[in-house]
Image (cartoon, rainbow, N blue to C red):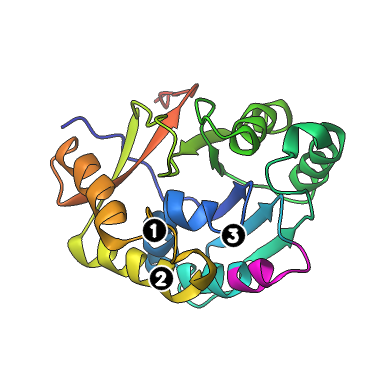
Amino acid sequence: MIGLFTRPPRRIAVLGAHCDDIAIGMGATLLALTGADPEVEVRALVLSGAGTAREDEERAALTAFCSGTKPQLEVLDIPDGRAPAHWDRIKDALARFRRDGDDEVVFAPHRGDAHQDHRLLAELVPTEFRDHLILGYEILKWETDTPAPTLYHPISTELAQEKSRLLHEHYRSQTGRDWFDDQAFLGLARLRGVQCHAPYAEAFVLDKAIIRWEQK
């Protein structure tokens, strides 16, 4: 297996269209990064759910997924399913969010996501984070939009199970959905693990990156 080795990032930005997108798409990666280095700075922006019980769920969940350290979280009140009608507000919010940080890596939905809210966010992120490494996470759901990933993060069985446990513990409003269960979360993670010779994995889509060789 070909590996790309680099130091862990110290400052990351995570973006989601809805409360729970980030945790579903990259919860184990958050657990791994913050568990290995409690000083990792995590900034998060979520487009919808402000002022509702969903925001409360998101704040508690992301604190848990950041190994008990509260991330810098902003939740907007864009109506669920209506993001394209609020293009200007989202573009402006992303611009402010980008200016307020010095992130090394940006995590967001991938461009091929079939949900209109996810897809719009994925399309706008590179227009603001022009000089950043952007990793597109996948969100398991009803649409048949599962991507062909280009980057894998191998995780242990314990970490995959902890991700699923935290999802069920903190997103009680979603547990009645037919896709929100251990079999779904662990099944996708196991498939990605098979693809990178690991027990489990989270996978990402990488559109563009730069590699530089140090000169002696």
Count of all numbered marks drawn on residues in the image = 3
72 up-or-down from 56: above or below: above
Q: Quadrant location of residue 2?
A: top left
Q: Position of residue 16 (x, y in %)?
A: 61, 48
- In the drawing, what numbered circle is on residue 42? 3
Of labels 2 and 3, the one closer to you: 2
131 sits to left or right of 88 = left
Q: Which amino acid, by three-letter code, is at mark 2?
A: His
Of labels 1 and 2, the one closer to you: 1
Q: Is residue 207 magenta?
A: no
Q: Which amino acid, by three-letter code, is at mark 1?
A: Phe
Which region of the structure is painted magenta?
50-57
Residue with the mark numbered 2 = 168
- What element does badge 2 sit on? helix
- Reading the chain from its start, which is encountered first: label 3 or label 1? 3
Q: Nearer the viewer, residue 183 or 132?
A: 183
- In the drawing, what numbered circle is on residue 180? 1
- Reading the chain from its start, which is encountered first: label 1 or label 2? 2
The N terminus - image quarter? top left
Q: Nearer the viewer, residue 158 or 49?
A: 49
